[in-house]
Image (cartoon, helix red, strand yellow):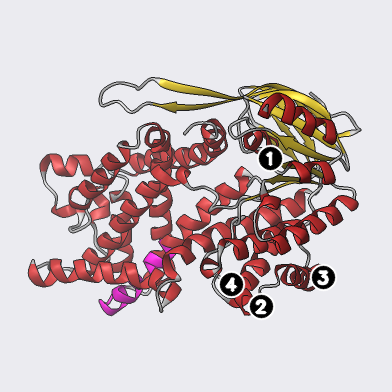
Amino acid sequence: MDTRSITNAACIDTLFDKKKSIILDLRIANFIVKKRNLAIMKSFRLGAIWNMLDPLLHSLIYLFVFTVIRYNSHPGNLMIGIALIRGLQQNLIYGASSNLDFTAGLKIERVRSRAIVLSELFYVVQTSFYLSFGTVLVLLLLDASYWVIPLMPLFCILNGLVWYSFGRVLSPIVQTLPDFKKIVTYFGMMMFYGSPALYPLSMTRGIHRQINLYNPFAFISEPARYMAFGSDSHRLLDPFVGVIIFTIATFSLVFGLYMIDKQRWRWSTWN
Amino acid sequence: MELDDDFVISVSDLSIVYRGRAKKLIGRGKIREVKALNKISFHIKKGELVAVLGKNGSGKTTLLGAIGGYFRPESGTVNTRGRVYTLKGANPGLVPHLSPRENIRMMSQIYGVSNQEREEFEKQVEEFCDLGEAYDRDFSSLSTGMAGRVGFGFTTSLTPEILLMDETLGVGDVEFRKKAEKKAMEFMEKGETILLSTHSLNLAKTMCQRGLVLDKGELVFDGPSEDAVDYYLKEIIK
């Protein structure tokens, strides 16, 4: 029989059937993600198709503005940047504020933190995949390499996880000081123009370039551009810095997800 | 503290404090504290049906929430043996955009109803709800009473070892209350444990063997339900 011990330090479940509990947690995680999607999409006639249409149309508008209205010589590079920067903004803000609604209203039984962690990962991977779907279609129309079909979804998922992980590390601050979410949102906006999204890294100059040589975004956008169009801006990046950045991101992701249990326990009696 | 073999719920010196911080433009606002439960201890054996009585704000919901694992104790411990389910309000987490039928199918999977049992389980919940064509409408379009039937029917059709019920039997029309009471009795006959928070003294007397009375976050009485009701009327309501 399952037992539970609740103290000030933690709520610890000792599960009798570990294998079954993992399956149930996977189902709960899937339910949480499905419920979130339904809450957004069910009121529209096209339903879940908007999950893919939304990022595609959003990117196409930017593509139109920056290629037709403001002339840009390489719409493919632009499309990659726009898709990735959208992933940055979406996941950074989501990670910073996600502990506000962890369980999607499930009240019957305390949702185990493991199910929440899985739901968070599923959600980031799923939204990043949807983002990549339309991007791949447009890139193929813009004569990108066929490598974009398997690799662009991976770049989008990697990008999503990196920025989600940074957002999660910031989430305790947002919980204590909700105004900080505004700062995170404005930081995301600033990254749109400051990062090599609308232009490749090779077009930056001076201190702008110096900063971007340490920008995690550049370590995803420039290899993605190389993969799709053979651009060579990625040569400006130092691989050693890249290793450090992705090590920090991995640590942030593991730490951020590990802290979910402690955070929700700590905040359970705060209002 | 380890849980004794006889008990399925063991609460020892449990205190719960809610905190909130006053908003301030500069600096950290002052922390406001409300002590919801103060050093509560009791043990419940398997198969007991226990009523929790008390005025509004006495700590009943907090006590059930703490046993369910929703609140962090300031001090003390809660130990439970078996799956603990909570029945609270009309919606236990159902998706507003899906029909009760679709919801029950999806939710039964996440609460461990096996493929072999699912058909029978779904039929049982549908019969209990007795919603007619409304069973295939969006959950969000149902009245509170109808939604309550779905939530109650689903939760009590599951097989928790411990069920925490927060005022749920007091809602709905007379017909629903009768059905709900019958369902709760069936549940109890299976030998499972129920902790029922209620304002209905009649319900506490007729359904429960034991009563706990809370007042201002303190456990002031623990004994047979009839005596608990008398104590509540004489000492708390006055």
Q: Mark 2 sits on what residue?
A: B132
Q: Do pointers 2 and 4 mark residues of a single chain?
A: yes
Q: State the residue at coordinates (30%, 37%).
A: A179
Tell me if label 2 and label 1 are in contact, CB under 8 Å.
Answer: no
Sequence-wise, the earlier of marks 1 and 3 is 1
Q: Residue B29: percent from the left, percent from the top?
A: 35, 22
Tell me if label 1 and label 3 are in contact, CB under 8 Å.
Answer: no
Q: Mark 4 sits on what residue?
A: B99
Query: Was residue A34 drawn as part of the magenta stretch in this picture?
Result: no
Label 4 secondary element: loop
**Marked residue chain, label 2:** B
Characterize the magenta stretch by its predominant secondary structure. helix
Q: Do pointers 1 and 4 mark residues of a single chain?
A: yes
Q: Quadrant of residue A4?
A: top right
Q: Which mark is residue A69?
A: none
Q: Mark 1 sits on what residue?
A: B68
Sequence-wise, the earlier of marks 1 and 4 is 1
Label 1 secondary element: loop
Q: State the residue at coordinates (52%, 57%).
A: A122
